Amino acid sequence: MIFSLTSRPATKFRGLRPIDLRRDLRPIANLIGEAFAGELDAGGRASLREMYMLARLGPLLYILLPTSGELGGFFRGFVWEEEGQIVGNVTMQQIDGLGYRWMIANVAVHPDFRGRGIARALMEATLARIGELGGRWAMLQVRANNEIARSLYRHLGFEELVTEIRLRCYSLPRLPTTPLPPGWSLKPLGEDHWSSANYVLHRAVPEPARWWHPTRHKEFRQGGDPAFKRWLGQKMGWRWKLRWGVYQGADIVGILDITAHDRGFHRLDVLLLPELRESGTEPLLYHALAELKRYGGRPIEALLYDYQSPAVETLRALGFRTQVELVSMRKRVSA
């Protein structure tokens, strides 16, 4: 009797597995670049370049990274494979010291494999993993015009908190001279005025938005720079900040910030008590923009939120263009 032995081709893995950065970095970077083609801003492109640079370390990653192929709380996640090709990805990152909050990002599926439930499977695995690690909240941001993704996240139990709107202008028109409302005045605010800034922050920013970006407290603790530092910044090309308290009589009712930069974007922000936004936002922004015009023709950027709609409308009327709108969402994972 003769036995014939035939070798069967090994079947390549198909499905979901944890990320192993030692071998997955480059294909993940390729996937993100293709899935988000045309959507990545400067920060996103820089992150992609960093991923490619790390991937070039090749075998060194097997020495630098633990056997799990993860970077602890800094870079975990899952990929989806089809016939040995990574066609789906999601990452999760711990964003607080206690591990209660986790940010989900880079939810990407190759265009040829969309509509097959891969994104849902990746998200469900990620939420389960966050719960296993003791996380209480899962957080993410999604483009406002990506209704398919927003619908998926809502079905998974996420709630929408606040929408972030990034505006940019490269050339300002002639600004109208609009006086402040009667009885209003502007006074410089430094770091020693934190209690006043904190009062405005809690009155002007809705609770869901305060929950989402507690870092605004840190930003607002950094008051305006003293006159000497501003003068030095102008001479040396450094970034410097000027903050005004907006007063109605003796009461503080808002904050107006400008940040000037000789090489990057000028930036501005305005916060007003809700009942004064409609009447006070426009003249305050004109004042801030006129001040920025004094420091060179740099482009100006404003990072605003949906609760600052009068500011968004005013800047758009002046020629500011929307770069991106991101909806911030959260889901309670565990108690």
Image: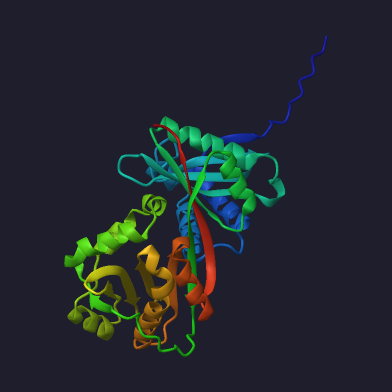
Tell me: 308 left or right of 142: left
Residue at image position (61%, 58%) is 145
Residue 134 found in image quarter = top left
Residue at image position (42%, 45%) is 93
> Which quarter of the image is occupied by the C terminus?
top left
Residue at image position (51%, 65%) is 41
> Which quarter of the image is occupied by the N terminus?
top right
Residue 145 at least partly seen: yes
Q: Which of 267 and 180 lies nearest the eye of the viewer?
A: 180
Question: Residue 154, percent across and down?
Answer: 57, 43
Question: Residue 279, percent across and down?
Answer: 41, 74
**Above or below 76: residue 174:** below
Residue 88 found in image quarter = top right
Tell me: 151 left or right of 22: right
Q: Which of 162 and 136 lies nearest the eye of the viewer?
A: 162
**Above or below 239: residue 110:** above
Q: Which of 29 and 189 lies nearest the eye of the viewer?
A: 189
**Above or below 335: residue 180:** below
Residue 109 at least partly seen: no
Tell me: 281 left or right of 121: left
Question: Residue 177, percent across and down?
Answer: 40, 89
Q: Which of 190 and 200 lies nearest the eye of the viewer?
A: 200
Most extreme residue toward the top is: 1
